[in-house]
Amino acid sequence: MTILELPEATVAPLVRAVADAPDRAAVGERFARAAWSLVAEPGDGDAGRLVEELGAEPAMAALVARVRGEAAPGGPTIPDAAFERWRGRVGSGAVQLALRQAARFAATLVIPGDEHWPGGLHDLGEHAPFALWVRGDHARLRALDRSIAVVGARAATAYGEHVAMEAAAGLVDRRIAVVSGAAYGIDGAAHRAALASQGGTVAFLAGGVDRFYPAGHEQLLQKIVEQGAVVAEVPCGVAPSKWRFLQRNRLIAAATQATVVVEAGWRSGSINTAHHAAQLGRPVGVVPGPVTSSASAGCHRLLRESEALCVTTPSEMAQLLGEEEPIGAGDGAVGSPAPLDATRLRLLDAMSTRAGRESGRIATISGLAPDRVRAELGLLELEGLVRRRPSGWVRTVPDPA
Amino acid sequence: MTILELPEATVAPLVRAVADAPDRAAVGERFARAAWSLVAEPGDGDAGRLVEELGAEPAMAALVARVRGEAAPGGPTIPDAAFERWRGRVGSGAVQLALRQAARFAATLVIPGDEHWPGGLHDLGEHAPFALWVRGDHARLRALDRSIAVVGARAATAYGEHVAMEAAAGLVDRRIAVVSGAAYGIDGAAHRAALASQGGTVAFLAGGVDRFYPAGHEQLLQKIVEQGAVVAEVPCGVAPSKWRFLQRNRLIAAATQATVVVEAGWRSGSINTAHHAAQLGRPVGVVPGPVTSSASAGCHRLLRESEALCVTTPSEMAQLLGEEEPIGAGDGAVGSPAPLDATRLRLLDAMSTRAGRESGRIATISGLAPDRVRAELGLLELEGLVRRRPSGWVRTVPDPA
């Protein structure tokens, strides 16, 4: 019998169906983690500490014993408040159901220590998920090792969706995976553009991976399953809720190396993702927008109130990873010539393209010393910016600046 | 005879015509400063130091003596490079012309020490202007004591002009004068909106105040003369040049207590104004815009590369002055309710507006302890957010967040 009173013979095949199921110990660990992901809400620090301390299986066994009133004296102490939260969910058989449902949807159970467990999640400490349920080849979670979250408002504008798509396309061009939450608006645009560019993309859901949410993104999520991965920390059968959306955001922030907020209303959930990222020490990029657009109000709020960096191009977003962009890859100021120094500016200011002027006259007009003017004119002539005519010096460029 | 060999009888009435002309000494000082503003280009630190050290009149006398080859041994030392810059402009009679022209346009000469000399200009040290030529009641320069520069691109978009006008109107509503450079685009929009709101506005020009620039703003500048002030550090007759535009920007930055850049291309002159302001320790606000708009590229550059603050409303701009906004004056987040705390969010998440649920069931769904759920339900009932029905608890609000 397992810790939750299900026959080993029932549980083991189910666990094996949702994992490259290894030895007996691994089965127990996996089953216990699946159980914890049902018993405790995402981010429950009491559960996280207990599992960290005892291991998932002994921790669940201790919980079950206490529920049965069989807790060993001197055994592990479960905080009373936590026990009250968990007891109503223990032994409900829901784990079996969740595993069965996962198997039906070909979802994989990935746990810490597995090859493809996203390293960034360790930074969540006691708030880390117990397990991840993954649809799509779970080996694709490797893409998270070089990934940026592109998140934003559901009520996005055409501007925001355009920027999100440019961002995602530009990032996958740089072999950076695009991570988001599969919501309408910015999230969807980011996933779509990543898919269209044949790039890696991972969607984190707030509910179970057996039920795609939002319903209108059924097809999109199906494509992500085929080309990337759809991930949740809650088991199959669990509905998304506001709280779980907020907790899901911490996964997006932690699993990636940087977070970019494209459009966000004053109290958008993506601000919450940005705060999670900042707390984890991950760089946060914010795309500005028109101040007349309420869909960018949250972005501007982040720029004002936090350490977030203004980002305007995929190149600037990629730089959040701390890598140097190769020369020419930048999409900002490339091609802008160096500004003229002050002397040359004043000298060219004092010249005409038509009326020739002697160097002394140019000195008086520009307020520069005549010697300096003669020397600079020589250099500028070599560079083709001025020319000597019988009537005096003229400049060859219409506008010196 | 004056230092520039003009008869005192010629000069004194001219100086008096352009000042509340006081005693003989003041006439000499004013005339000398007018002369320096012709001899040296704006921001010439050598001239600034010399005038600071000797006073304007003795400094000009020393320069004239050296031009004549009459420099007294052991007299003040003029750096050779500086002397070479200045000598071609000494004694040209242009001062007389400039004063005559100023008198014709009813321009006033204001010098340091005068009641209305803008205090902020002292921060420029040796690069401070020698004098200001002012059209419009020079007493209106007082408005600079509580002023913000609103500057930006000439090639502004409809968005930028809209924001500039909202900014200027909102600032003058708060009794803050709007200072700009009278250029096309953002500058013009800011001046216009300030005028329309009956607010204080001051335009700093790069050329003499006798010749309005740009020509298309002749009418606008005339209105600023009537209601505010048009100011230049170069005398009448001096043409604007690229160099003088850049130097004019330092005046705008120094004369105001903060600078706001509304729209700016990648290498807009307003970035130069922002840099001057930052160097002077003045706060710099930057209005973001669409990243797809090249007219905002310079703004985003400032947000990325400098200490500039993102500002989106007149209230946020006014806050650059370091004053507290009265409650309700903010135009940002007013009216946003405080977010629900995590417990309440999870609790309301677990409830329905239709199906009644017992507190124990709500505890299981939400993953909260039953005691906690019962206590919170009581509080939420008092606040009208939940209701007890025969079938159980329901919430009264459709969306908890």
Image (cartoon, coloured by chain):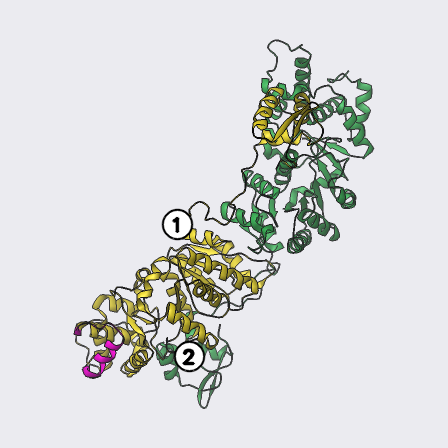
Chain colours: A green, B yellow
Q: Is residue B38 left or right of residue B59?
A: right
Amino acid type of disc 1? Gly
Asked if marks 1 and 2 touch (Cβ < 8 Å), the reply is: no
Q: Find residue A347 and name its label.
A: none
Q: Position of residue A329 (x, y in %)?
A: 62, 58
The amino acid type, in three-letter code, at marker 2 is Ala
Mark 1, Cα crowd under 10 Å, few <14 / some 14-19 / many 20+, is few
Q: Residue furthest bottom?
A: A390
Regarding residue A322, the answer to whether it shows in the image is no
Please tell me whether mark 1 or mark 2 is closer to you in this view: 1
- Return the residue nearer the eye: A129 or A119: A129
- The quadrant of the image that shows the C terminus of chain B is top right
Judging depth in this view, the residue of A45 and A30 nearest the camera is A45
Which quarter of the image is occupied by the N terminus of chain B?
bottom left
The magenta-colored residue range is B3-24
Q: Quadrant of residue B9?
A: bottom left
Q: Which of the numbered marks, if any, corresponds to residue B322?
A: 1
Q: Which residue is mark 2?
A: A350
Q: Which chain's residue wears label 1? A: B
For the residue pair B49 and B251, the one nearer the viewer reads as: B251
Q: Secondary structure at mark 1?
A: loop
